[in-house]
Amino acid sequence: MPGFELFGEAERREVNDVLNSGVLMRYGFESQRLGHWKAKAMESELCGQLGVKHAQLLSSGTAAVTSALAVAGIGAGDEVIVPSFTFVASFEAVLMTGAAPVLVDVDDTLTMSPKAVMNAITSNTKAIMPVHMCGSMADLDALKSICHSHGLFLIEDACQAIGGKYKGLSLGTIGDMGCFSFDAVKTVTCGEGGAVVTNNDRFAELLDQYSDHGHDHLGSNRGTDDHPIIGYNFRISELNAAVGLAQTKRLPEFLKLQKEHYTILRSALTGISGLTFRRVPEGGEESCAFLNFFLPTVEVAREVIELFSEQAINDCFHYIDNNWHYINHWNHLKNGLSANGLNDSQKKGLARLSCQDFSQSNQWIGRNISCLIKVGWTKSEVEQRAATMATILRKVLT
Ligand SMILES: *Cc1c(COP(=O)(O)O)cnc(C)c1O
């Protein structure tokens, strides 16, 4: 998955444009910037590649999720449904808006279970935020229909699945808004960066204002801009955007390599008895950022991970024991250990997490192994890795 593996001349050239003009800010300075608008250029590149009307580039994926929730009007007293298996950024973003995160089980797609979502809806629910974890998607038709019948927003966290598709549409462009991260370990990197994409003109306008102190960006003088709403600073710098612009142009190349490497690994593991692959919802096309499979028990998965690492297969994850991606180790969240104060509805929501039953999630996450697909591998490296993995799995499973 990581774009940091392939980094070179194209990225350097874009960054040098910015260094040569000396304009590091994405807005203003028109007479000095020598025609370079890296953030704007990356936004239009994203729109073109993803097939979406608007993209707002931001300082991080966390900023993207926070801004998307905020411009949907979500705040104190509201609840946002997120999956138990995600990156901590999901609940962090919900908390930053003042709303309370409600965590629900995942199923064999490794994304939120529509049934669990139905059971979690209350009169305070305002949005459902599926997270397309490890390169594949939630059952978006089921979630869309729940949102439709309950009047909820659907906000996709597609940070780990850029390039994946669902029924012909790019992930991130299907809900009301979709969020991407361009941090250092994502498919495309800016160093730090993120984006919200949407086909909704009003959300696009609000995102532009919210992420830059409320500026309406209507005039040519920032000092005399009006401020229709209270905003914050979630801007990206031109330096980061320059790197991301070069990387975004290379996205098709990254996706092609991911798919090739994924296919080699998957073929080698196909047919091993006791091993099943993650379910991809009908009509879905993975981004191939990861290859995910299930083993019969959590113990077998633990054993396999250990044998993998003895053979230097180190890019596979067993998330049940992970500090950053699964509810089990989020004691800071369950105990509400926040530096800033939390409101009563947030405190109540978090208190509920400690006694909530996540046994369904444990079943899937405990038996899952998730293998990162690197784009920097040579073909013979992938083939060798595939053979080693298959040998280990066959041995353990017979
Ligand atoms: C990386 C990631 C984020 C946050 O992105 P940052 O750019 O690191 O803030 C959010 N959600 C998911 C699922 C991620 O993987």
Image: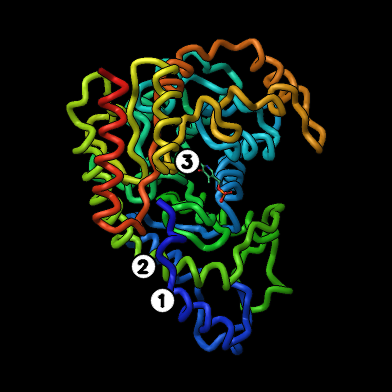
> What type is the residue that disc 1 sits on?
Ala
* Picture residue at 65% right of the left edge, 37% below the top: 92
Q: CA distance from mark 2 to mark 3?
A: 22 Å
Check mark 3 vs ligand 1: CB closer than 8 Å? yes or no.
yes
Snapshot colouring: rainbow
Instruction: Assess disc 1: are there few (<14), some (14-19) or many (≥20) residues with their C-alpha within 10 Å of its C-alpha.
Output: some
Q: Say which residue appears at 47% left-offset and 41% top-offset.
A: 157
Q: Give percent across and percent down for residue 333.
A: 69, 27
Q: Amino acid at mark 3?
A: Asp
**What crowding class fits label 2: few (fewer than 14 Cα within 10 Å), some (14-19), or many (20 or more)?**
some
Residue 246 % position (x, y): 42, 71
Classify the position of ligand 1 by quadrant: top left, top right, bottom left or bottom right.
top right
**Which circle, 1 or 2, is nearer the viewer?**
1
- Res. 328 in view: yes
Tell whether 122 sits left or right of 275.
right
Position of 262 compared to 105: left or right?
A: left
Q: State the mark number for residue 10.
A: 1
Q: Return the residue at label 2.
A: 249
Asked whether disc 2 touches disc 3, contact meaning CB atoms under 8 Å apart, the reply is no
Residue at 49% x, 69% y is 243
Q: Which residue is mark 3?
A: 157
